[in-house]
Amino acid sequence: MTTATMTTTWMVELRYEEDADLTRAIASMRLPSGRLLTAEGQARRNPVDRPRASIGEEMAGARALSGLAHRLLEAAADEVETNVHGGDPAI
């Protein structure tokens, strides 16, 4: 017996804003429903450390992606709640 497999791709975008001491990452993704999820992460360089942009980007990006994962879980929970109650928010 064979089963059909469905493949779906969701794209995540990471944007960075940086200065000498602070890196800010914004992660975003659009759900198939059209809902846009976003989250932000930051990394601050310790003044005694040498500047290395890649470290700040990795830290800020990881924090933004972690926040995005939490928002995705919340969106899924909202969908479950709507499904359980048949789409009636008053129940």
Image (cartoon, rainbow, N blue to C red):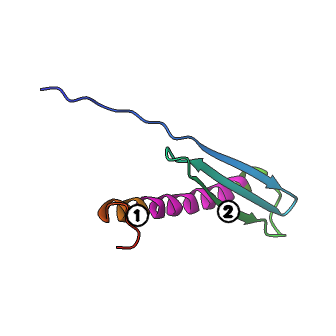
**Earlier residue among tags 1 and 2:** 2
Is 81 left or right of 41, judged from the image as shown? left
Q: Position of residue 21 (x, y in %)?
A: 84, 63
Query: Which residue sits furthest top?
Result: 2
Give the label on residue 41, or none: 2
Name the residue nearer the viewer: 88 or 36: 88
Q: Is residue 82 left or right of residue 13?
A: left
**Residue 72 magenta:** yes
- The residue mark sitting in front, 1 or 2, is 1
- Quick check: 84 left or right of 41? left
Image coordinates for residue 9, horizontal then vertical, percent: 48, 36
The dot on residue 77 is 1
Q: What distance separates the C-alpha of mark 1 from that of mark 2?
A: 23 Å
Dominant secondary-structure state across the stretch colored magenta:
helix
The amino acid beneath tag 2 is: Gly
Other residues around mark 2 within 10 Å, as few (<14) / some (14–19) / many (≥20): many
**Which is more toward the observer, 91 or 25?**
91
Residue with the most extreme left position: 1
Residue 79 picture quarter:
bottom left
Amino acid type of the residue tagged 1 in the rendering: Ala
Q: Are marks 1 and 2 in contact (CB under 8 Å)?
A: no
Quarter placement of the C terminus? bottom left
Number of numbered tags placed on the structure image: 2
Label 2 sits on a secondary structure element that is strand
Q: In this view, which residue lies farthest toward the bottom? A: 91
The kind of secondary structure element at disc 1 is helix
Location of residue 74 in the rendering, given as x and y in whole percent from the top left corner: 47, 64
Magenta region: 57-77
Residue in the image at 55% along x and 60% along y:
66
Q: Quadrant of the N terminus?
A: top left
Q: Residue at x 43, y 36 (%)?
A: 8
- The x and y percentages for residue 46 are 79, 69
